[in-house]
């Protein structure tokens, strides 16, 4: 039996938090595997984070930022990236996966405008149009893992966020192992994935919400299958 660490601060009023266990159960049943999961509150992720994650086979950084312990969340994402642990990040998980990579690989300050309003050119900035309870179109990058998972060039997904990737930093994807996996109709980044990693995908949208409509999210199924 393998276990998934759900990294984040559980709140039963958050729609995505109610959807995630349903999506995982659907994926587990579809694949016929023995995989279970535990919620790991960010406040418990003290250093070294290895002690909290080494018994898990995968990590999902869930929506619900700002987290109580931002540093602990970033360290958990770093553990998954460095140790080739299958990783999925949705909404806040996307934002913090970008922050972790920016800090560790791009060598820039991992700033988030929600928690640092004075940051100049933060990596995560307010969206021009907030995506609160929005269903929007997105387009997968050709050759991306995400496109292969969905089996199509574009789809629609649900969002619940006010912050996203700051396009000022778009050039940093050039010659980077971190790739853009999907964009919206205006070209803004909506998903990323990491080359040379068993499974590392993060999306600004919340694919787990499909489970509340009795639909198995393709991305969640692919994540569980990678464990």
Image (tube, rainbow, N blue to C red):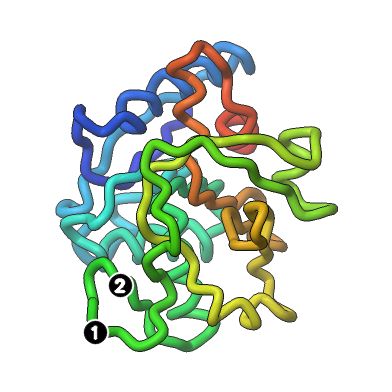
Residue at 67% in and 53% down: 185
Residue 197 appears in the figure: no
Q: Residues within 10 Å of mark 1 (few under 14, many from 20)?
A: few
Residue placed furthest toward the front = 129
| Quadrant in which the C terminus is drawn | top right
**What residue is shown at x 61% (from left), y 58% (from top)?**
192
Q: Nearer the viewer, residue 159 or 57?
A: 159
Residue 134 in picture, x, y percent from top left: 45, 38
Q: Secondary structure at mark 2?
A: loop
Mark with earlier residue (1, 2) = 2
Q: Is residue 204 visible?
A: yes
Which label sits on residue 118?
A: 1
Secondary structure beneath dot 1 equals: loop
Q: Picture coordinates of residue 189 (x, y %)?
A: 59, 61
Locate residue 113, reporting x and y percent: 30, 72
Residue 4 vertical position relative to residue 71 in the rendered view, above or below = above
| Residue in the image at 43% along x and 75% along y | 123
Q: Which residue is mark 2?
A: 113
135 displayed left or right of 199 = left
- Using residue 123 as the reference point, say whether residue 6 is left or right of it: left
Q: Nearer the viewer, residue 204 or 216?
A: 204
Pointers 1 and 2 in contact (C-beta within 8 Å): no
Determine the residue located farthest toward the right in the rendered image. Answer: 143
> Along the horizontal axis of the image, is 38 left or right of 219?
left
Q: Nearer the viewer, residue 174 or 184?
A: 184
Question: What residue is drawn where x is 66% and y is 62%?
Answer: 187
Q: How many marks?
A: 2
Q: How many residues crowd around disc 2 within 10 Å: few (fewer than 14), some, or many (20 or more)?
A: some
Residue 17, position as x, y percentages in the image: 31, 31
- What's the distance in space between the residues labelled 1 and 2, CA to CA? 7 Å
């Amino acid at each position: 039996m393998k276990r998934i660490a759900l990294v984040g601060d559980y709140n039963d009023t958050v729609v995505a938090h109610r959807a995630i266990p349903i999506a995982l159960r659907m994926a587990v049943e579809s694949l016929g595997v023995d995989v279970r999961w535990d919620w790991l509150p960010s406040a418990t992720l003290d250093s070294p984070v290895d002690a909290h994650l080494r018994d898990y086979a995968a990590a999902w950084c869930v929506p619900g930022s700002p987290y109580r312990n931002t540093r602990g969340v970033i360290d958990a994402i770093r553990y998954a990236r460095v140790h080739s642990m299958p990783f999925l990040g949705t909404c806040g998980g996307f934002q913090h996966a970008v922050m972790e990579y920016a800090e560790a690989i791009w060598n820039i300050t991992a700033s988030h405008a929600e928690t640092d309003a004075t940051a100049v050119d933060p990596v995560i900035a307010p969206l021009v149009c907030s995506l609160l309870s929005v269903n929007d179109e997105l387009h997968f990058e050709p050759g991306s893992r995400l496109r292969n998972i969905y089996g199509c060039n574009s789809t629609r997904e649900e969002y619940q966020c006010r912050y996203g990737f700051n396009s000022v930093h778009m050039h940093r994807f050039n010659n980077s192992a971190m790739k853009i996996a999907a964009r919206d109709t205006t070209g803004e980044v909506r998903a990323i994935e990491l080359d040379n990693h068993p499974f590392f995908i993060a999306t600004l949208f919340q694919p787990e919400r499909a489970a509340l409509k009795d639909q198995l999210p393709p991305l969640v199924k692919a994540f569980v299958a990678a464990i």
